[in-house]
């Protein structure tokens, strides 16, 4: 681990040097693709992976305040943590859109262009870059719907300053094709240690690529079942993640530069001088884990400060006034925080896990789309989800005997299988909040009770997307995208219009 942290630090210092010592380095590279060697693709890939993990700004706003609160992983009473009350804050809602297009998208498009156009480029690098580009756009379109895609990030490359907004349907079809193409390119070569996910392991990237393909395929389950089935079958037959060793995450570090930090940690890590103390674990997740005897509760939660000795989740929808009338506690100190060891600036940031992959196969099997026995994959998924926390610290691992007891007490029931899978998927995507929010909108699980807070923007229903930046209105491409999705000009209303795959 010390060697990995040192290597990450050296890589990032080199990236920072490259960024600052070459005036507008990315623009120069885009203007003349023959100069690709002026920026080492290794450094650019590292940089882009870290920017995809994200910083404090977007992780705090789009990730925590909105996604984690709407999905009822977290709850809070502070005036600015209002995601579970469905109020509107334009800069919070658009934060990931704003950051992604100025950082992640621009850099990954530049890297892919370099690897596609410069003679002799490493094709395994190109395959990994294509897969990572899907990671970036997959998250963006799930949150915002129709987005700039085919022309995005090409202001310097092709002089496209106002890219068109592609339909989410067309984006999904292209992302699936890109995953297939990217996987096919994987062989010898690659980014080596500059790859913060798998250290350049092409076989691990193939398993990740196919698991990501399965996730995208299942996202289409209600919008285009036949296409979903076809791609799900292709993904399963291609070879999915095989164990927790395949989990896709970046192990962050505390320095030597803030770019190395976990964005959630930059919000919640009190030990590093940040430490927003507003959020607590939601009553929804605490009560469900308590009722099912889930051994993860003592891993994800920190006991309340009131000395009760038992976990207590905060109900969603409370504020600094209504908490005084709440029977479960009248101060935030009466409720469980998330375990601070999970939200350090040095904590891992997850993109996809073996547990998610297995639960998706279980769902595919329930639908008759292949994959074998749904009960077996469900059990594999739950078992893997219990082991996820070993990535944070070996002492957080749940022992197999406790997992066996949990599965015996909560057996898979095919008559209720979709619901069980949905709850478990929601549980394992704690701190992968964008994915938790997306899968809930697709499946309707877990069974969440919406909050009808005074002045909410959605008539007491959980919003179904985040809102675009308001300053985009008035441009032809953006206005056309609003019209195509049946959306008006009022940003507040955008959050109540489902994205294409949300049926």
Image (cartoon, rainbow, N blue to C red):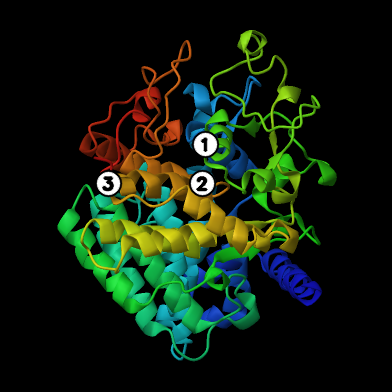
Q: Is residue 167 left or right of residue 60?
A: left
Estimate how packed mark 1 is, as few (under 14), some (14 to 19) or many (20 or more) residues with alpha carbons within 10 Å: some
Q: Where in the figure is residue 268, as x and y percent of width and height? A: 72, 40
Q: Where on the picture, by quarter, is residue 492? A: top left
Can you see residue 112?
no
> Which one is earlier in the sequence, the residue at label 2 or at label 3?
3
Q: Is residue 253 left or right of residue 245?
A: right
Can you see residue 149?
yes
Residue of label 3: 415
> Which one is earlier in the sequence, the residue at label 3 or at label 1?
1
- Cα separation between marks 1 and 2: 10 Å
Q: Where in the figure is residue 351, as x and y percent of width and height? A: 52, 59
Q: Quadrant of the C terminus?
A: top left
Q: In the drawing, what numbered circle is on residue 288?
A: 1
Name the residue at 44% across, 60% down. 379
Q: Where in the figure is residue 90, as x and y percent of width and height? A: 49, 29
Residue of label 2: 427
Mark 1 vs mark 2: in front: 1
Q: Where on the picture, by quarter, is residue 372? A: bottom left
Mark 2 vs mark 3: in front: 3
Q: Where on the picture, by quarter, is residue 117? A: bottom left
Q: Is residue 86 left or right of residue 414?
A: right
Choose between 7 and 413: the one closer to the eye.
413
- Cα separation between marks 2 and 3: 21 Å
Question: The residue tagged with tag 2: helix, strand or loop?
Answer: helix
Does residue 460 sit above or below 143 in this rendering?
above
């Amino acid at each position: 681990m010390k060697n990995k942290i040192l290597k990450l630090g050296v890589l990032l210092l080199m990236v920072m040097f490259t960024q600052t010592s070459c005036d507008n380095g990315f623009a120069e590279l885009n203007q003349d693709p023959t100069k690709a060697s002026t920026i080492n693709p290794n450094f650019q890939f590292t940089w882009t992976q870290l920017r995809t993990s994200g910083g404090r700004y977007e992780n705090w706003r789009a990730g925590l305040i909105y996604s984690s609160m709407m999905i009822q992983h977290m709850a809070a009473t502070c005036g600015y943590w209002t995601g579970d009350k469905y109020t509107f804050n334009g800069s919070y809602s658009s934060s990931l859109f704003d950051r992604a297009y100025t950082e992640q998208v621009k850099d990954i498009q530049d890297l892919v262009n370099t690897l596609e156009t410069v003679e002799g480029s490493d094709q395994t690098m190109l395959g990994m870059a294509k897969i990572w580009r899907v990671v970036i756009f997959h998250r963006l379109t799930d949150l915002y719907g129709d987005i700039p895609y085919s022309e995005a990030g090409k202001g310097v490359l092709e002089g496209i300053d106002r890219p068109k907004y592609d339909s989410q349907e067309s984006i999904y079809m292209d992302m699936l094709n890109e995953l297939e193409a990217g996987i096919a390119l994987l062989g010898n070569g690659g980014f080596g240690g500059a790859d913060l996910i798998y250290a350049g392991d092409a076989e691990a990237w193939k398993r990740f690529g196919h698991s990501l393909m399965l996730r995208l395929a299942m996202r289409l389950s209600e919008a285009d079942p036949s296409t979903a089935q076809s791609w799900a079958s292709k993904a399963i037959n291609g070879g999915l993640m095989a164990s927790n060793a395949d989990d896709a995450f970046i192990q962050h570090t505390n320095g030597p530069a803030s770019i190395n930090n976990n964005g959630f940690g930059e919000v919640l890590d009190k030990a590093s001088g940040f430490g927003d103390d507003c959020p607590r674990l939601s009553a929804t997740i605490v009560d469900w884990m308590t009722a099912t005897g889930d051994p993860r509760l003592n891993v994800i939660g920190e006991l309340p400060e009131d000395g009760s000795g038992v976990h207590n989740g905060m109900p969603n929808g409370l504020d600094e006034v209504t908490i005084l009338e709440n029977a479960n506690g009248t101060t935030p100190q009466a409720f469980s925080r998330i375990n601070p060891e999970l939200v350090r600036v040095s904590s891992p940031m997850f993109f996809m896990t073996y547990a998610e992959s297995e639960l998706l196969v279980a769902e595919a099997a329930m639908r008759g789309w292949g994959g074998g026995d749904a009960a077996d994959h469900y059990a594999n998924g739950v078992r893997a989800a219990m082991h996820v926390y070993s990535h944070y610290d070996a002492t957080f691992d749940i022992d197999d005997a406790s997992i066996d007891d949990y599965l015996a007490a909560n057996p898979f029931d095919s008559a209720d299988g979709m619901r069980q899978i949905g709850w478990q998927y929601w549980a394992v995507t704690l701190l992968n909040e964008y994915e938790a929010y997306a899968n809930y909108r697709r499946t309707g699980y877990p069974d969440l009770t919406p909050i009808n807070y005074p002045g909410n923007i959605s008539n007491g229903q959980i919003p179904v997307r985040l809102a675009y930046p308001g300053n985009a209105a008035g441009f032809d491409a953006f206005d056309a995208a609003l019209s195509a999705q049946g959306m008006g000009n009022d940003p507040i209303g955008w959050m109540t219009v489902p994205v294409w795959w949300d049926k």
